[in-house]
Amino acid sequence: MSEIAIIGAGAWGTALSIILGRKETHRLRLWAHEKEICESIARQRVNEMFLPGQLIPACVTPCNDLAEALEDAAIVVSVMPSQHCRRLFEQMRSHLQAETIIVSATKGLEENSLLRMTEVIAQVVKADGGTAPRIGALSGPSFALEAARGDPTAIAIASQDTELARSVQQEFSHASFRIYTNEDPIGVELGGALKNTIAIAAGVCAGLGLGHNSVAALITRGLAEMTRLVIACGGRPETMAGLAGLGDLVLTCTGGLSRNRSVGVELGRGRKLPEILAGMRGMVAEGVFTTTAAVGLARARGIEMPITEQMHAILQGSKAPRAAIYELMTRSSKSEALT
């Protein structure tokens, strides 16, 4: 019986508890920051706040205490918002064993440090002379609701520790949930994070009333600038043609369940960002934070990311959406092969 702790009971963390709970070989604890979520699951077996209507298996124990959640856990799945990752792992560090497998399923970058989530986790766990953790990144095209209800879903587990990747593949795979291994955590993590910014841009196009031509161009050129940054950071370009790159990008840019796209739609319609975020009822659109980090990372690496730069200007309130699109379209002419 595998002991698994899932840290973060948002929509994706809850969906993972449902998916993993379908296997009789798992005993799971789902940690929630909000006590009302624990009460909702204990009483109704449903997370009414973040994933209503999806029944959570009896093998999933909700808890509000990190020490309780982590006790005897062989695998820890971190699914907290990116901006809470460092703080939570500082609290979790003393409860982690050297052999514990950590699976990061958060798609974002730390805003101030510009670090990927596995980098943040490794930095925290190794602090004060600790050993380097066994860690992998889980990412790919995966709306929580669809995965939870059993729609066929395929994602990737990325780690340079091939034994870890195979273990997670074996533990997490299910008839409706296919896991592929990948040896490029840099590309997989950056793909999962950067696509959120492009999804905001796709939403802006929809909010402005633009058609399929515009979105197709945006996705294609968005993938190009994502790939440039991935390569500059040491990742592999072929990763961007896979599940964590193109797959997740298409899903998030076109799917109606995409929170990042939804933020962009409302921005395109003229609403202000604080008002949009206030209406999300605790849901997190990672792209809002990631865009600032992505701009900083691109500038540090000397990489041109025009779509990301324009989305940053929109999110900061310094440029109107239609003006940002106009500026993208009137940039100096270039060769597709070189840019």
Image (cartoon, grey):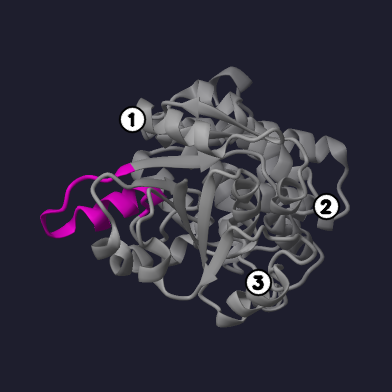
Does label 3 or label 1 sit earlier along the sequence? 3
Q: Amino acid at mark 2?
A: Ala
Residue 161 tag number: 1
Q: Residue pushed farthest top?
A: 337
Q: Residue pushed farthest left?
A: 129
- Label 2 crowd (10 A; few <14 / some 14-19 / many >=20): many
Element at label 3: helix
Observer-nearest residue: 280 or 321? Answer: 280
**Residue 203, x across and y down, in percent:** 76, 53
The residue beneath circle 2 is 206
Question: Residue at (67%, 44%) from the top-left corner?
Answer: 142
- Label 1 crowd (10 A; few <14 / some 14-19 / many >=20): few
Residue 228 tag number: none
Q: Please provide the residue range marked out in magenta.
A: 114-134
In the rendered image, is residue 241 in sight?
yes
Horizontal side, residue 110 vs residue 243: left or right:
left
Horizontal side, residue 284 vs residue 305: left or right:
right
**Residue 252, x across and y down, in percent:** 70, 46
